[in-house]
Image: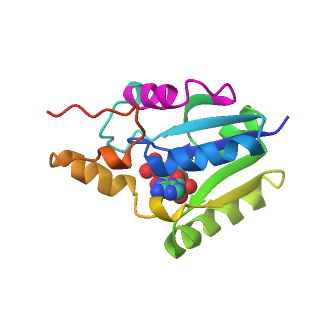
């Protein structure tokens, strides 16, 4: 059974994440969308809200599981018997960042492979940090988010 993990904070999940996940579906038997929880980080949306949006986005996909985890992503992978980490690449900055993490992960957990999918060009510009900034200042981010992610205006 091929089990993969797609880790992130998904604050909120974007169309960029959604696209990578949907394109990964034919490659694996199970995909865990894993929300890393870092107690030192401030999130814009609650964990429950983020989980709910992901579940709604993939409600018809039986291969998709949603879980949160604390600590190292590789420990989470070991605990659920995952041998693959999925990452999306938008540009050379993503590549350099991911290369460092991927090579370290390979050194400490050799059975684990990181699988990279290139972003579709139309999603290259979507970045959750910028999406959060827009939300904070009341901007309309509908075009960047999956259909089921509805942001209520404050
Ligand atoms: P988060 O802000 O949710 O933690 P990250 O930016 O860490 O998300 O991204 C989690 C994964 O999703 C990374 O592999 C990242 O490259 C990928 N990703 C994020 N946005 C996009 C996008 N627009 N297109 C493709 N992949 C993306």
Observer-nearest of 62 and 133: 62
Q: How many numbered marks, from 0 up? A: 0
Residue 139 image offset from top left, x and y in percent = 19, 49
Q: In which image quadrant can residue 119 be found?
A: bottom right
> Height in image: 126 above or below 153?
below
Q: Is 34 on the left or on the right of 30, as rendered? A: left
Observer-nearest of 86 and 35: 86
Residue 75 image offset from top left, x and y in percent = 68, 41
Q: Is 77 on the left or on the right of 6, as rendered? A: right
Q: Residue at x 46, y 28 (%)?
A: 51
Residue 12 appears in the rendering = yes
Q: In which image quadrant can residue 58 be found?
A: top right
Q: Is residue 56 magenta?
A: yes
Residue 117 image offset from top left, x and y in percent = 65, 59
Q: Is 65 on the left or on the right of 18, as rendered? A: right
User: In this picture, which residue range is highlighted in magenta?
Assistant: 49-64
Task: Please identify the quadrant where the N terminus is shown.
Answer: top right
Q: Is 104 on the left or on the right of 95, as rendered? A: right
């Amino acid at each position: 059974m091929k089990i993969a993990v797609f880790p992130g904070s998904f604050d909120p999940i974007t169309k960029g994440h959604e696209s990578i996940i949907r394109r990964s579906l034919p490659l694996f038997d199970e995909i865990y969308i894993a929300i890393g929880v870092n107690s030192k980080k401030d999130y814009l949306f609650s964990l429950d809200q983020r989980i709910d949006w992901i579940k709604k986005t993939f409600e018809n996909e039986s291969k998709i599981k949603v879980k949160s985890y604390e600590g190292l992503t590789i420990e989470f992978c070991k605990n659920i018997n995952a041998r693959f980490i999925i990452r999306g690449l938008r540009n050379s900055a993503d590549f350099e960042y991911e290369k460092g993490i991927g090579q370290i992960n390979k050194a400490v957990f050799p059975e684990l492979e990181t699988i990279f999918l290139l972003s579709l060009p139309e999603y290259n510009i979507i970045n959750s940090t910028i999406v959060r900034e827009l939300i904070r200042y009341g901007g309309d981010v509908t075009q960047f988010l999956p259909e089921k992610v509805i942001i209520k205006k404050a």
